[in-house]
Amino acid sequence: MIRAALLALSFAPLAACGFTPVYGGQGAAFQNAGPITIGEISGRTGHYLRNELARTIGHGVPGISSANLEVDLSQGIERLAFAPDQAASRSDYVGSASWTLKAPSGLVLATGRVSERASFNFADAAYADLAAQTAAQERLAGLLARSIRADILIAAGRQNTAKPAPAPAAVTPATAVPASPTP
């Protein structure tokens, strides 16, 4: 009982200073954050990628009131290792995603391109290679979503820290410097 009271007392100064969790949605930074709508992404990996993006940034990003995210996913398989019979024994799913974040008005807020890879082994058991490939696709989607999320957070931070250039001082006739006479 005493430990619980001491623990509660230790958090009191943090509440007084305006401390909010970095990834929490209750801070002042999230007051201007609106939902991000994520467009359809084709394929199985695209399905996993869209779900992960919806989970991590769908609720909003500080500094972006609301937006639409469009993702173009391309992926392939690279064979890395071969068995003595020349069958692939280890491969990588390689994926690249180009993304565009647009305001509801259509104004482009940020764009980017990320690339990731996820390795998998071919197993000797029947259908085990399908399970390994599916797991690699899920890992690839998670890695791509993490990279896209990081890029969007950086872009939102740049927008929030960009300060408008100061307006040039107006020249009035009283402060104008007379031109030097020409001889």
Image (spheres, helix red, strand yellow):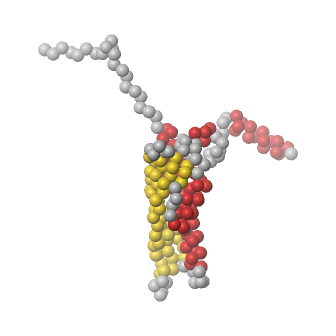
Q: Residue furthest right?
A: 1
What residue is at 44 percent from the left and 51 percent from the top? 111
Q: Foreground residue, 153 or 71?
A: 71
What residue is at 56 percent from the left and 46 percent from the top? 61
Q: Where is residue 128, by image quadrant?
A: bottom right
Residue 152 coordinates in the image, percent (x, y): 51, 49
Observer able to see residue 15: yes
Q: Residue furthest top?
A: 174
Q: Residue furthest bottom?
A: 85
Q: Is residue 58 above or below residue 137?
A: above
- In the displayed structure image, the side of residue 7 where residue 69 appears, left or right: left
What is the quadrant of the C terminus in the image? top left
Residue 117 coordinates in the image, percent (x, y): 50, 66
Residue 3 coordinates in the image, percent (x, y): 82, 45
What residue is at 58 percent from the left and 55 percent from the top? 54
- In the displayed structure image, the side of residue 136 where residue 15 appears, left or right: right
What residue is at 33 percent from the left and 12 percent from the top? 174
